[in-house]
Amino acid sequence: MIKINSLIFLIPFIGFFSLLYAVKKILWILKQDEGNSKMKEISSYIENGAKSFLKAEYKVFVYFIFIFSIGLFLLSYIDKHTSPLIVLSFITGSFFSAFAGFIGMRVSTKANVRTTQAARNSLKNAFDIAFSGGVVMGISVTSIAIFGLSILLIFFLFLFFPNSFNYNNKNNLLFVVELLTGFSFGAEAIALFSRVGGGIYTKAADIGADLVGKIEQDIPEDDVRNPAVIADNVGDNVGDIAGMGADLFGSFIATILAAMVLGCEIDTINIDNFEGVSAVLLPLFMCSFGILISIFSNFFIKINKNNNIYYMLNKGNFICIILNFIFSFFLIKFLLPNNLSIRNYYFTSQDVFYSASIGLLIGFLISIITEYFTSTERYPVNFIIKQSLTGHATNIIAGLSIGMFSTALPVILFSIGIFLSFYFSGFYGVAMSSVGMMTTTAMQLSIDAFGPIADNAGGIAEMSNLNKEVRERTDILDSVGNTTAATGKGFAIASAALTSLALFAAFIKITGIKGINIYNPLVLSGLFLGSMIPFLFSALTINAVGLAAMKMVNEVRRQFREIPGIMEYKSKPLYDNCITISTKASLKFMILPGLLSIIPPVLIGFIFGGEVLGSFLIGLTVSGVLMATFQSNTGGAWDNVKKSFEKGVYVDGEFLKKGSDAHKASITGDTVGDPLKDTSGPSINILIKLSSIVSLIIAHFISI
């Protein structure tokens, strides 16, 4: 008879094997040609800028980890349900999250210049390198997460319950799983600071480069004469690579843990050959095999001269979804007994499969919806293009309208998905729906991380004065990358929504709350307070970008004004000055938004109790999902409107291109949208999850 305590060792092995595959990809990328000395010089500027930022950011992380480790240590002595080892879990999660982002950033700064050089030969070669860099990111993040979480789980089980892990006692297993919430707390905290800090960095540089370079000096994007151009390219790596990697690392971990906590509540009618606890470990197995399926699916993403790149990426993603759908059916049937229940809600293993499949379907449909609202080939972006003909104001009005409208379909989809997943298998079904979606994380992140690498490659081509054909090839990759980045943000929002619901269900279980009574004025107040937090958070992050951008604009103007010969290529701009401005601003302004996700849940929970905190979390989640969707889609649409004018576009029979009044209006829209789609919107995802995890950690203190 197979024992679950034998199969559990398969999980870290899968994580380790997947990491070896990522290493193989890294070695292949490093073997590719870096190009001429000018390309290498520019690439080194970008790489050194990214390293210096992460070094400064990680110093701040050390202080944060130290302070919160003390807090967790003190709480562990007060709470009999946990152990001081939750501090070890927290530190490990923080380290692994930072490490995953670091690997992605390092590989992206190596792949960008090699993508540029490959574009001198063919579009296919350039795509192969850029996408390989994305694959390294996707596989590294998920395999490190699985390896770290499973090793920590095995360590705690052996440490506390060495007698065959003592699986038959569900309380013992719940004790260990709750210790692992520290791992998720560390991962999400680092993710939030990485997202906010990286977002402030990249958008301050981007806005400064665009407002002065494009509009005032009328020079191309990524022109070597622009003092902010290196900081702008650095920002693509620290924001869209390290930040996004840490974001989905946190979602991946939080989803698994929420489902594991609820799995501890599952009752089996007849104990199966896996000792009745397979429902706890099923999320780990599904996400582990999801990484292997993503690796296999990557082999189907190949292009030639006649292939549409976006079509091929969608093909690989679709294959990944179908294979996960098929494999999850057999895995769930193998691991779970047929008769299960949670909180007197009875269901079967087949019902759990239906719930997981709903999550897969939601992830797929969210990608389609996001692509519709942000793609240059679709009506919404073309509507904004047409509205740009009459000026800046109508561009802004149209963009806001499209962004608000774009929230409707995702919310309807979430609502149907939540209802159906609960209908099939209760709260456990809601959690498994989120797990089903996260099985494709490695593929989603691979596709998303490809975009910033392609963007950097185009910048290096422009700054190295390579021929027009090279820039055209990198622009094709960049255009696809803009859409994949938008769909990646849509996936991150969807994962945050379902993950937060799973965490909320786990929070309800631990606190023992029977329901949320909105007739209670304190509970209703908590609902409103939670709904307000995403707006306050957005105000802080957007204002931070604005303040940093002002400093950047003034510095770029000063250099153009005071350093003679920049426009004639006779003098080199002071790139380091702009890098310093972005770095200092991001480190200064990321602290307060980060604390906003941690302190309010703690204060509300301890002062007013679990029911009020529960209503706070509901308000925060609903408001946050709407705000994140609106901001990400609005910014993504504005970005592609600008890109359309820069390529040249026909509107009502008139050909409009770069330099036209409509193009200048689109630059304004894109500038407004930049902090929405790359700073505030993506960070709200983590705000929602981190607040839920903090609430879960303190749940025992405020339990009924």
Image (spheres, rainbow, N blue to C red):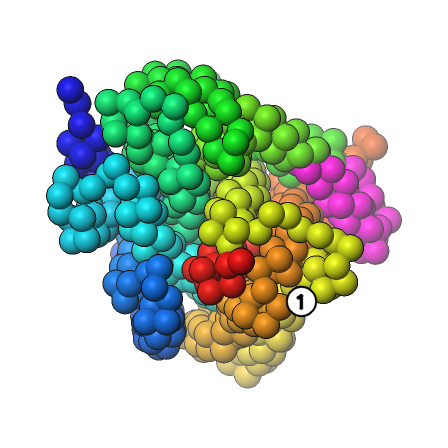
- The amino acid type found where label 1 is placed reads Leu
Indicate whether 287 appears above or below 195. Answer: above
Residue 30 screen position, x and y as percent: 21, 45
Residue 406 part of the magenta-drawn span: yes
Which residue position is annotated with label 1?
A: 536
- Quadrant into which the N terminus falls: top left
Residue at the limit of the structure toward the bottom, as seen here:
562
Residue 594 screen position, x and y as percent: 51, 68
Query: Which SS type dominates the magenta stretch?
Result: helix
In the rendered picture of this protein, how many numbered marks are placed on residues? 1
Which residues are drawn in magenta? 383-411
Indicate whether 571 appears above or below 361. Answer: below
Q: Name the secondary structure under disc 1.
A: helix
- Quarter of the image where one finds residue 120: top left
Residue 354 visible within the image:
yes
* Residue depicted at 40% across the width and 31% down the height: 267
Neighbor class of circle 1 (other Cα within 10 Å; few <14, some 14-19, many 20+) is: few
Pick whichever, 208 or 636, lies toward us.
Answer: 636
